[in-house]
Image (cartoon, coloured by chain):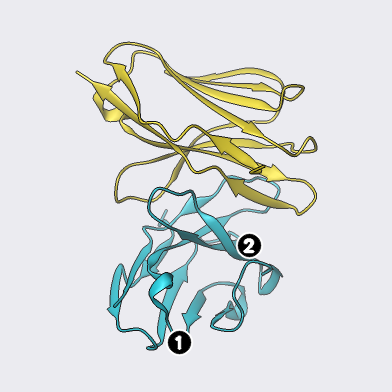
Chain colours: A cyan, B yellow
Amino acid sequence: EAGVVQSPRYKIIEKKQPVAFWCNPISGHNTLYWYLQNLGQGPELLIRYENEEAVDDSQLPKDRFSAERLKGVDSTLKIQPAELGDSAVYLCASSLGQETGELFFGEGSRLTVL
Amino acid sequence: QKEVEQNSGPLSVPEGAIASLNCTYSDRGSQSFFWYRQYSGKSPELIMSIYSNGDKEDGRFTAQLNKASQYVSLLIRDSQPSDSATYLCAVTVSSASKIIFGSGTRLSIRP
């Protein structure tokens, strides 16, 4: 069974440029999460989807971040414009449901903003 | 007070010894508790989940939960160099129906 797939693995951009990350969850997993992880810190939730509905986006900086999950499968996280402080690893995870709490993570997308 | 607290370490344990990792949480309504292992430069992977008070054993790993004390721990027996990683404690927060991660404890197993 394929795991959670993310792309790109690495991205280097200049500040004020846009960037987008893509995630394909494990087949059959209805719940999809985007987390942000800074060095030496635990993952911090940005947004959670149940199928195509964003059910928790309270931590998503909506002035510059946006996300979508069309058809309840793949998801895209976008930052526009990027700031220096956005440099981090963006992790996508999926699970059978929020109740299980057992998350399967992708390899992450490491963003460096210069 | 952070919702999930862990000692950042590093925790250094000799090979073959027992490594003990601890985590406290603030939400008394939390029902689900997880330990994830994260190797340097890699993403977290689930190693243990525990839902009721007491001990849960899986191979060399034992998770312990005490809801009255709001405390969850992970014991690693016969520690191996391959156990060197950061261990993340995660807890479901009932009020917000979300999973919160601690900042992790870095474990180093010395030969």
Residue corresponding to mark 1: A81
Q: Which residue is mark 2?
A: A30
Vertical order, B91 against A110 (above or below): above
Quick check: B64 left or right of A106?
right
How packed mark 1 is, by other alpha carbons closer than 10 Å (few <14, some 14-19, many 20 or more), is: some
In the rendered image, the vertical position of residue A2 relative to residue B103, given as above or below:
below
Nearest the eye: B25 or B92: B25
Above or below A32: residue B15: above
Q: Chain of mark 1?
A: A
Question: In terms of sequence position, does the residue under pointer 1 or pointer 2 come before the other?
Answer: 2
x and y percentages locating residue B36 in the rendered image: 48, 39
Q: Chain of mark 2?
A: A
Occupied quadrant, residue B79: top left
Estimate the spatial distance between the alpha carbons at disc 1 and disc 2, rounded to whole Å: 30 Å
In this rendering, the answer to whether B42 lies above or below B8 is below
- The type of residue carrying mark 1 is Pro
| Residue B87 coordinates in the image, percent (x, y) | 44, 35
State the mark number for residue A51.
none
| Residue drawn at 28 percent across, 21 percent down | B80
- Residue at (34, 11) in percent of width and height: B17
Q: Which is more foreground, mark 1 or mark 2?
A: 1
Which residue occupies 39% across, 88% down? Answer: A16
